Image: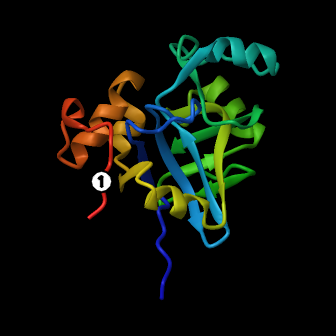
Amino acid sequence: MASLSLTNHFLIAMPTMEDPYFAKSLVFVAEHNDEGALGVIVNRPIDMSLATLFRKIDVPLDAGGLGDSPVLFGGPVQTDRGFVLHRPLGTWQSTLAVSSDIGLTTSRDVLQSLGLAGSPRDMVITLGYSGWGAGQLEHELAQNAWLTVPADPRILFELPHEQKFSSALQLLGIDPANLAGHAGHA
């Protein structure tokens, strides 16, 4: 039996999600296989701008208009490390190819290019990531902790962070106001 892969999907936290790291979160799954899953939360800005981050890591930020962009909380794992979700895929040193045009990069060269040339222009920068061990995400799905839907790059890269959660729900035809805070089993 082939295993389910949620790579390049959104995980939408159900209202019953009690984990404070994930309550009301929208997670982009960059990799999901038999060994586990890796993703980044894409709708939770932290109190840090790109200008502040670039100063802290001593990378010039000369590309206009990017300095005020927020850095996001990507998840509770390695919160001192940056993760850049971007398109186009590019040829960076440490990139996980999620699809033919979306990558998740952890190497400094993508930040240097962003700072000097403003490329890649479509990007989400997080501190930390979200990770699940083998079978852990599948267990959470069975417990109705998450809804899943194929990721929409427009939601990832074009919408304000505060609209991403409800827009992902709308991909499923769900009005966020009608999402129940409890789950049933048939």
User: Quick one: 23 or 182, which is closer to the camera?
Assistant: 182
The reply, left or right, for residue 169 in relation to residue 111 is left
Callout 1 crowding tier (Cα within 10 Å): few <14, some 14–19, many ≥20? few
Mark 1 residue element: loop
Q: Name the residue at 62% across, 73% down.
A: 34
The reply, left or right, for residue 176 in relation to residue 90 is left
Tell me if I can see residue 5 in this picture.
yes
Give the labeled residue for mark 1.
184
The reply, left or right, for residue 43 in relation to residue 133 is left
Tell me: residue 20, above or below residue 66: below
Q: Position of residue 161 (x, y in %)?
A: 41, 25
Q: Position of residue 102 (x, y in %)?
A: 50, 51
The reply, left or right, for residue 178 in relation to residue 57 is left
- Report which quarter residue 13 is drawn in: top left
- Report which quarter residue 70 is drawn in: top right
User: Quick one: 166 or 107, which is closer to the camera?
Assistant: 166
Q: Position of residue 84 (x, y in %)?
A: 62, 38
Q: Name the residue at 59% across, 18% down.
A: 46
Amino acid under disc 1: Gly
Tell me if I can see residue 88 in this picture.
no
Q: Quadrant of the C terminus?
A: bottom left
Q: What scheme was used to colour the molecule?
A: rainbow
Tell me: residue 182, above or below residue 7: above
User: Quick one: 108 or 80, which is closer to the camera?
Assistant: 80
User: Quick one: 87 or 151, which is closer to the camera?
Assistant: 151
Tell me: residue 119, above or below residue 9: above
Q: Position of residue 64 (x, y in %)?
A: 54, 14
Q: Name the residue at 54% across, 17% down.
A: 66
Q: Name the residue at 57% across, 29% down.
A: 20
